[in-house]
Structures are given as C-alpha cells and as structure tokens.
Amino acid sequence: MTKQKIYNLEERTYLFAKQCRFFIKALPKTLNNIEDGKQLIRSSGSVGANYIEANEKLGDKDFVMRVKIARKEAKETQYWLKLLKDLNQHCAPKAEELIQEAIELRNILSSIINKKLP
C-alpha cells in the first residue's frame, strides 16, 4: 500500500479498503471485473468495519468474534484480489501489493486473537 506502515489499525484498514476501490476503478469494465469487483469492495470494507465494531466490544467474547470476522474478510479479500489479478495481468503489480497488505492484516488480526484467547 504505502512505503511507510500505519500502526493505527482502524486507519490502516480504511486505507486498504480505499486502495481496493481505486484498484477496481482502474480495471476494464468487463462483466467479470464488475461482479468480482463488487465482492472485493464488500470484503475489503468489512475488514475495517468489523475491526471498528470489535473496538466497541460488549465483552471479550464479542471482541474476539468480531476480530475473527475481520480476519475472515481479509482472507476473502485476498481471494478476490488473486482472481482479479489472474484475469487482469496488466494490473498484477498493484494486485500483488494489495494481496500482501491483506496477508499482513490477517497476520495482525490473528496475533490480536491469539493474545486475547486463554
């Protein structure tokens, strides 16, 4: 995403969702790209939305559940990015950058979950 990493996870997930939207905007308007792009937009936005909800937790179980959902959405986002990359080779470098960020977000979310679980 950017050369300098952002350590505020709410801000980082927001910027990730924003970059995914810019990525979709740059793709050719084919039926595949439109449909897969809609899925990418939903899942990339859900990473941050669920993390924000986790921070407004009702308890530790609620927090862990919502962070797990955010992690699941990051994994789904990675799937849509790989599919779009394979179908749009001219955009592969940007897709790879976003895939790497999705992996890093998943790892961060996994670490948060592991610290909260007994």
Image (tube, grey):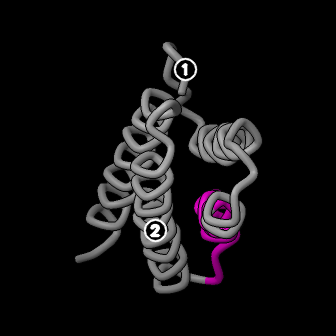
Check disc 1: other Cα within 10 Å, few if <14, some if 14-19, many if 20+: few
The answer to whether residue 32 is seen in the rendering is yes
How far apart marks 1 and 2 lie (CA) works out to: 21 Å
Residue 35 or residue 48, whichever sits in front: 35
Residue matched to label 1: 2
Q: Amino acid at mark 2?
A: Glu
Q: Amino acid at mark 1?
A: Thr
Q: Quadrant of residue 97?
A: top left
Secondary element at tag 1: loop
- Estimate the x, y position of residue 107 in percent, counting from the top left: 31, 51
- Estimate the x, y position of residue 68 in percent, counting from the top left: 43, 74
Magenta residues? 37-58
Does residue 20 appear to the left or right of 65 in the view shown?
right
The answer to whether residue 51 is seen in the rendering is no
Which residue appears at 50% of the width and 76% of the height?
69
Q: Is residue 84 above or below residue 113?
A: above
Residue matched to label 2: 76
Quadrant of the image containing the C terminus: bottom left
